[in-house]
Image (cartoon, coloured by chain):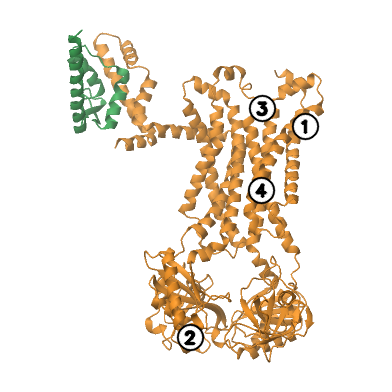
Chain colours: A orange, B green
Amino acid sequence: MAWYSRIWNVVRGERVHRDIDRELRFHVRERTDEFRAAGMSAEEAGRQARIQLGNPVVQMERTRDMDVAAWLDATFRNVRLALRSLAKTPGFTATVVLTLALGIGANSAVFSAIDAVLLRPLPFPDSDQLMLLEQKRPKVSQTFVAPVRLMDWGRLNSTFQGISGYYTEDASEISGELPEKVKRAFVAPRFLEVLGVPPALGRGFRPEEEHFGGSNAVLISDRFWRRRFQADPGVLEKRLRFGPGSFAITGVMPASFRFPDRDVDLWFTSPMDGPFGQARQLTWFNVIGRLKPGATLAQARENMSAVQTDLGRQFPQTDAELTVDIQPLKEVTVGGVRESLWVVFGSVSLLLLIACTNIAALLLARATQRQQEISVRYSLGASRASVVAQLLTETFVLALSGAVLGLLVAAGTSGVFRTLAKSLPRLEEIGLDWRIVLYTLVSAIAVTLWCGLIPSIQATRRSLTSSLAHGGRALVSSRNPLQWLLVGVQVALAVTLLSGAGLLLRSFRELGRVSPGFEPSHVLTLHISTNWAEAGPEMRPRRDRIIEALSAVPGVESAATSMAPPGVPFGFQAELKVAEGRAETDPKILTDSRFVTSGYFATMQIPLLTGEPCRDAGPPQVLVNRSFANTYFPGAEAVGRHLVPPFPAARPAEIRGIVGDAREQGLNKTPAPMVYFCGADAQPGTFFLIRTQGDPAAMTETVRRKIREIEPSRAVFDIMPLEEHLSDAFAENRMRTVLLSFFAITAVSLACVGLYGTLSYLVNVRRREVGLRLALGALRGQIVRQFLSQGLAVAMLAALAGLGLSLVFTRLLAGMLYGVSPTDPLTLTAVILLTLAVATVASLIPAIRAALVEPMQVLRDE
Amino acid sequence: MHGYAITTHIQQVSADLLRVEEGSLYPALHRMEQDGWVRAEWGVSEKNREARFYSLTAKGRKQLAQEQETWARLTEGVERVMRYV
């Protein structure tokens, strides 16, 4: 085990030294004895013996070299030297370490998000086998599946191990003192089997519990267990009450199980053989499936398509037009944010690049100042490689310190993600683990090479005589192309980031200026817990009673309900037919719909343009917006016609009037044709909208109490002003904009500091020359102009290069911009002007300092 | 044998024809120890001084046999060439 002991001996340095010393001393003593025996005096014998052995230091070193791993020894020595040398310049060391800590830390933080959300597989065993299945009907955008069909698919397919499904609703649990709002998921049989996660405590559902009429069982989440039962292990067989039914808790799911989403507290079985689940056209399930090992997505698609075609033949009325769409579950979960995350990652990497370039310039300047030391080293016999190794070790020590601090920064900023991007999927999985630590270490090494290689190689160019003779100054050429190149790179990259940030900021502002078509302020939204079982005609009068009572509360102007708050995208497109008939050439009516009560338009202040307001009771009525009227009934009268929705047994609804266009589907989309169905059913998830006279948040308690008076057994939850909903819808947009702006400002600061630093250094080096010129009659203004133009020339060239880069970079942002094009000339011009202004300021100070040089003093220093 | 004894031994046995270069003795011994050809232990010499004693290992013996063979081939080769000079 020679190599092992060689490495070990490096650490045991002192011990090895002592042992060799003892051995050599013994040798000398024996030789002395021999010489004394031959007749020499004691001291003469000793001297001769030592001479014969040779230079003790050399002997020690050569013997030791055999015992230690040379490379490790050299590394330790270099690290010690680096630490000493860095400690002598605390300002420089602190600046570099802090800059790297911020740069590497930010980079690792974003990477941790990307790793957790995009790269890691979903937290289920063999999660790449999990798929989401949707049924698609040509004219309807809703994709839920009927329970009967789910069972058919499960029975008839050949590529899935198992197919199951779920749907969620909010409910009110009443076994406590106050009704508590909970979110519950109803799951089809074999749900836990398909996902592959067993309960942490207790058991899953038994087959008899999955049938209609079987005993009522429920699984609870870890969060609910801790909140409600304080993690009491005796929670099994306790009962929860919902409405008239009581349910026994059979198990607790592990903390990491957050399916279908992180708010679900309870899982109930949804029996497939109940009387209400047999109709093929009533759809409500989200279907998931696990592929058999070895089955591919393409095979599954083919097979399911064949299965559905067969079902279509068997049940032509309900199934003939359906197709099955299969997507990997992970793709569905994270696909939407992929672009945003990569944009943020690209930006933060650019920032790190700029920081590194800055540091490289600093290192270059520092290395040039040590020319004398390096020349002495060469003259003592060091190889170029060993000197380069020593300089690189210094850089590595800086990079490693920065990386370790950066990890702390990254740990702290995961909180930032939680606030900035609340809607990010898999948010709870973001955290630091060994992969991020490894990534940080690799970044440190990459940073070392990027920052340190060129300065080290540059500084170790051999020209011994000149540097030793001239005391280190003549080696610095006045043109310094490498340093200017580094500054130029920084400015170019900063311009790129600035352009991106500028475009996003303008886009954000344009969104803010858009007129929504409705009045979002002074509106309070809330939910009242109901469940699917009672979502029928009986709920309507109760809902109407609530609205009436709310409207009567002092401080409330009007109240209404809607399936979705205005301004937040809600997908329900359907093809409508006109009962009076349309010409063959007229386009099909495929529009968005909203399900509201009659008070909606007054509450949201959407003006009624023609016709009359609709009534909630009586025959079905709709209001359409102006865009709809113009698109589908141009020039003709829309009021009075009847629309027929594509549901079986749907009654024709009369168009009572036309209202103004509102940006219901999001403020960044132009208003599309919209149909408002009045007097809709009160389904779970309905939003109650209340217009208040004063601050909506102040009315929260009053409203809650009022509703408790009327419906004491229902929980009121998610009470928040409408503007908060709208702001949440922008959360992703805002995260991007804020982060990118922050990066851009940092980048510009770094570039500014880099420019200032390089020019300062240059001025310092050329002090003699400037003094001479001033003494010979040059004007101070000329000196200023000379240095200023040097700085500006570099900045201008770099800005143009950065412009070219931006045109490529901003193209990537094209999909995220609103109201401004990726090559918007106004923004880009502003960016260039800003950069030049900053460059002027950065160059002016050193230039003026140069002009203030006292020629007599400089010449005297000669 | 300790390092000094090796020096005197070689000198004596070769009848003073070979003398060990003392500058490279200990580096060589330590390298052989790292390679596993000799084993070293601290012990006490005849004069009651602390010394490091080296002995051959099995691996060392094998290496010695190899070196002997190489040496024999070398000398034979040189001898043959010399016959023709």
Instruction: Tell me the mark number nearer the camera, choosing from 4 and 1.
Output: 4
Q: Residue at x 40, y 83 (%)?
A: A209
Q: Residue at x 71, y 29 (%)?
A: A763
Q: Which residue is mark 4?
A: A807
Binning the other alpha carbons within 10 Å of mark 1 as few (below 14), some (14 to 19) or many (20 upward) gives some
Binning the other alpha carbons within 10 Å of mark 4 as few (below 14), some (14 to 19) or many (20 upward) gives some
Q: Which residue is mark 3?
A: A479
Q: Amino acid at mark 4?
A: Leu
Estimate the spatial distance between the alpha carbons at disc 3 and disc 4, rounded to whole Å.
Answer: 31 Å
Find residue A848 and name its label: 1
* Residue in front for this viewpoint, A348 or A220: A348
Q: Which residue is mark 2?
A: A277
Q: Which quadrant does the C terminus of chain A fall into?
A: top right
Residue A325 in percent (x, y) is at: 49, 70
Vertical placement of residue A540 versus A775, above or below: below
Q: Say yes or no: labels 3 and 4 on the same chain.
A: yes
Q: Amino acid at mark 2?
A: Gly
Image mark 4: chain: A
Residue A431 in percent (x, y) is at: 51, 58
Task: Kindly state the secondary structure of the residue where label 1 is placed.
Answer: helix
Do tag 4 and tag 1 residues touch (Cβ < 8 Å)?
no
